[in-house]
Image (cartoon, rainbow, N blue to C red):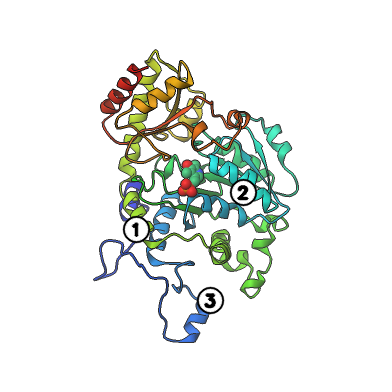
Amino acid sequence: MEKHLDTICVQGGWKPENGEPRVLPIYQSTTFKYSSTEEMADLFDLKKEGYFYTRLANPTVDAVAAKINELEGGVGCVLTSSGQAANLFAILNICNAGDHIISVNSIYGGTFNLFGVSLEKLGISCTFISQSSTDEEIQAAFTPKTKCLFGETISNPGGEVFDIERFANIAHSNGVPLIVDNTFATPINCRPFEWGADIVTHSTTKYMDGHATQVGGAVIDSGNFDWEAHADKFPGLCTPDESYHGLVYTKYFGRKAYISKVVSQLMRDLGSSPAPMNSFLLNIGLETLHLRMPRHCENALKVAKWLKENEKVAWVRYCGLEGDPYYELAQKYLPDGSCGVLAFGLKGSRQDAIKFMDSLQFVAIVTHVADARTCILHPASHTHRQLSDQQLKEAGIAPDLMRLSLGIENAEDIIADLRQALDRI
Ligand SMILES: *Cc1c(COP(=O)(O)O)cnc(C)c1O
């Protein structure tokens, strides 16, 4: 029987047998014992499944990966040590030096740098396109070396909603997968596979954890992309891997080819595995994700409406707010709520904005979003400070943009704090 997402949040993943702990245990061990050389050899040859070294697999980490996989509706999930590592692995798993990717430009600053700077150094080039590009403009960005299309369900911090279905169609008509970073929506509010995405990534650091206790990431495979049908583009999946005795991932793992390669090649060679303790903390967060998301969204909508009416506020952007440029897309992809993050700018000088931020009492200035506590950030001077003004604008971020991440406190108290700080300017 297929369970509701709420039940998966609470009970997914860890399934204790008789006499085992009810609560997911922390297997804080790098190694696992076997009694014969042969048993160990079979594990290394991928002939049998089992634990032998925590960089490759760990029971605590696997249980949480299984829960996230079930929430997204995939065939497999790999947890990583950070969201950055998740997006890096999602790309490296299908791209070699000389390859090319296409990404929407309104994405998280860290991902923008990863694609524009570090992947470039590895010989993988990226063409950034605008969310509002026409189909023809997007089509023009494809080259014979293009291996995927990338976007975020709700962009951080621009709040733009990704037209997943449209981009999936364009990707598929070019024989490449669509990768969607679903961090801000979470599977509670959007499940990108249902709209045609092939691979989903997460920074679990955000809502999934929800309490700002661990940095982590996830890559989830829908199992739907037909790699064999485009075998010339994806030799890493469709031709023998000499570092695994000539195994061909698509032949050996079928629909789990992509996600199996993430573990057996990228985790093996590059690391970036999460600590069991962190997965344990993430799991506790996931147990209340379905309760927290609606409150984050409710608070964001209340505060967005209040800000919009305030005479000192120049503009407010929240895709859940009627009249927002992304309201229609949000209604399509995020009918039950989007996320708790909104953006706004104040009338007046840069100095006023700083005075406002510094006058806040419990709404804290932190480099973080999407946890239980309300916080605020000025991307141009924090997360996105590496970007030029021009790049900021291209990424959909106004230099005066303040990113407000609504927590799950009482909305009236949050509004009272914002009001008293606005009154000071
Ligand atoms: C934070 C974030 C990341 C990076 O994740 P880390 O866990 O900080 O490495 C990637 N994508 C989005 C949308 C994010 O918000």
Q: Is 216 placed above or below 160 here?
A: below
Q: Nearer the viewer, residue 40 or 158?
A: 158
| Quadrant in which residue 425 is drawn | top left
Q: Nearer the viewer, residue 46 or 279?
A: 279
**Disc 2 crowd, CA 10 A, few/some/many (<14, 14-19, 20+):** many
- Judged from the image, the secondary structure of the residue bearing numbered disc 3 is helix
Residue 7 in the image, given as x and y percentages of width and height: 31, 50
Pointer 2 or 1: first along the chain: 2
Given the image, on which type of amino acid does mark 2 rest? Pro
- Judged from the image, the secondary structure of the residue bearing numbered disc 1 is helix
Circle nearer the viewer, 3 or 1:
1
Disc 3 target residue: 44
| Quadrant in which residue 373 is drawn | top left
Q: Quadrant of the N terminus?
A: bottom left
Q: Name the residue at the right extreme.
A: 144
Given the image, on which type of amino acid does mark 3 rest? Phe
Residue at coordinates 31% horizontally, 64% vertically from top-left? 25
- Residue at mark 2 to residue at mark 1: CA–CA distance: 31 Å
Disc 1 target residue: 280
Residue 234 left/right relative to 323: right
- Mark sitting on residue 203: none
Q: Is 206 placed above or below 248 here?
A: above
Given the image, on which type of amino acid does mark 1 rest? Phe
Residue 336 left/right relative to 412: right
Residue 136 in the image, given as x and y percentages of width and height: 71, 32
Does the Cβ of the disc 3 residue fall within 8 Å of ligand 1?
no
Residue at coordinates 42% horizontally, 27% vertically from top-left? 320
Residue 360 in the image, given as x and y percentages of width and height: 33, 27
Disc 2 target residue: 177
